[in-house]
Image (cartoon, grey):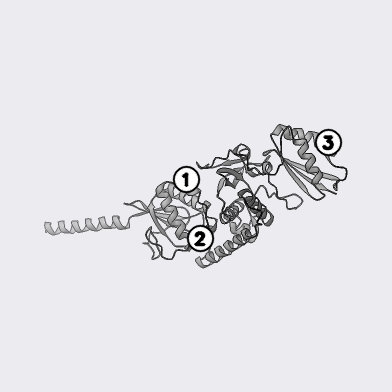
Amino acid sequence: MKAFYKRICAAVAVLLALFFLLGGCDFSGFGADAGGEGAAEDEIDGNETAGAYTPDARVSCMLRSTLNEEQQQAYDLLQAQLYGCPERVRLTKLSEEELHEVLSALRGDNPLLFFLKSAYSYSTETLTGRVTLLPDYTDTPENCRRRLDELLNKARSIVAEMPPEASDVFEKELWLHDRLCESCVYASGENDATAYGALIEGKAVCEGYAMAAKLLFDLAGLDSCVVSGEGRPEGELPESHMWNAVEIDGSWYYLDCTWDDPVMTDGGDVVRHFYFNLDASLMENSHVSDHIPAFLHCDDTRQNYFRRMGLYCGEADWQDIFEDVLSEVGAGESVELMCADAGLLDEIAASLFDRAGIWDLAPGDREWTRFTYSVDRNTNCLYLQFEA
């Protein structure tokens, strides 16, 4: 009897060991409860590619470079699989923080994954530590694929409109920046944080602008990334914000399409360039990043919009620049200029506007008879609008 009892106990021990080896999982994460069911038939691991769909589009994966080797493997697998909307994807061993970093980098690098929700669930195998991601999507796989193709076709058509004279990276960036700002308005909507909202529906908030710019830059062959953090408009409370950085000739520059497309009090649509290719010293006056990747050193000023366009005013030449600008501007047109520092901005404003010195620099045969102006003290920029 004792021998039989020992055999029963041994069999139970084996069964318990097998249960914990094969079935023991710790479910945690964000969003809906992951549940305790076993892997579905469409579960994918690193050796499986069945059912995968990857759009034929260039992607600048700069945020991928911020991940460790295991995270990059997970990133690559997810990038290859999530466009097909699988119910789950089995990954390597990752901590909760590492998985969050992978998904943040993936979403930032891939604007076409706009249908992937930020909320997700995951399970962790008790003995191996391997993670299975259970992603969530905004729609059915068929509708996600249809809208993805719609967005990709729209973005490609925009890039195809770019004129031949936009030949270098700066000119391509400038044309795409202006095109995006002209066709999108800052407004809330169901898809306002996506490139789909910005390019298809024509309305977006900061994340939608940044993701749309990233997509257009990808398709045009430009290296760029999105940057998230806080925006601090002058005289206003800080707010969550997203913007871009673009690489030109080995140097990185900050770009904020949202703040270059301001909501005007009179309902007008104005495209500005105050935040076009800024270095860190200017951008950090109003933008604070959550995390600055190691590759992102924005300390060059050569490709700043105003320097490239001859609209950068120094102490010695600002009067000559204003005289040239005022001789060419017509009624109904506007002018933007950047001053070397805040002191010069105040000096120019006092000289031209407070003491009406602008009329001494203006030509006698000008079309305009009046003007309005505004300043952006975060960037030391001036904006003038001329009217008949």
| Residue denoted by label 2 | 137
In the rendered structure, which disc, 1 or 3, sits on the residue that comes first in sequence?
Answer: 1
Q: Nearer the viewer, mark 3 or mark 2?
A: 3
Query: In terms of secondary structure, where does tag 1 sit?
Result: helix
Q: Is residue 307 visible?
A: yes
Task: Work out whether mark 1 precedes mark 2 in sequence or the reverse, and give the earlier one.
Answer: 1
Q: Nearer the viewer, mark 1 or mark 2?
A: 1
Residue sitting at x 55%, y 40%: 297
Circle 3 is placed at which residue position?
357
Q: Within the image, what quadrant is residue 149 found in?
A: bottom right
Q: Secondary structure at mark 3?
A: loop
Within 10 Å of disc 2 (Cα), the crowding (few <14, some 14-19, many 20+) is some
233 w.r.t. 102: above or below: above
- Residue 135: x %, y % from top left: 46, 58
Dividing the picture into quadrants, the one containing residue 5 is: bottom left
150 on left or right of 129: right
- 3D distance between C-alphas at marks 3 and 2: 59 Å
Residue 80 at x, y = what percent?
45, 59
Q: Give the amino acid at mark 2.
A: Tyr
Residue hosting label 1: 66
In this picture, residue 5 sits left or right of residue 35: left
Sequence-wise, which precedes: disc 3 or disc 2?
A: 2
Assess whether mark 2 and mark 3 are in contact (beta carbons under 8 angstroms): no
Instruction: Give the spatial CA distance, label 1 vs label 3.
Output: 52 Å
Along the line of sight, the residue nearer the viewer: 256 or 247: 247
Identity, as a three-letter code, of the amino acid under mark 3: Gly
Identified by mark 1, the residue type is Thr
Residue farthest along the right direction in this orientation = 364
Quarter of image, res 277: top right
Q: Secondary structure at mark 2?
A: loop
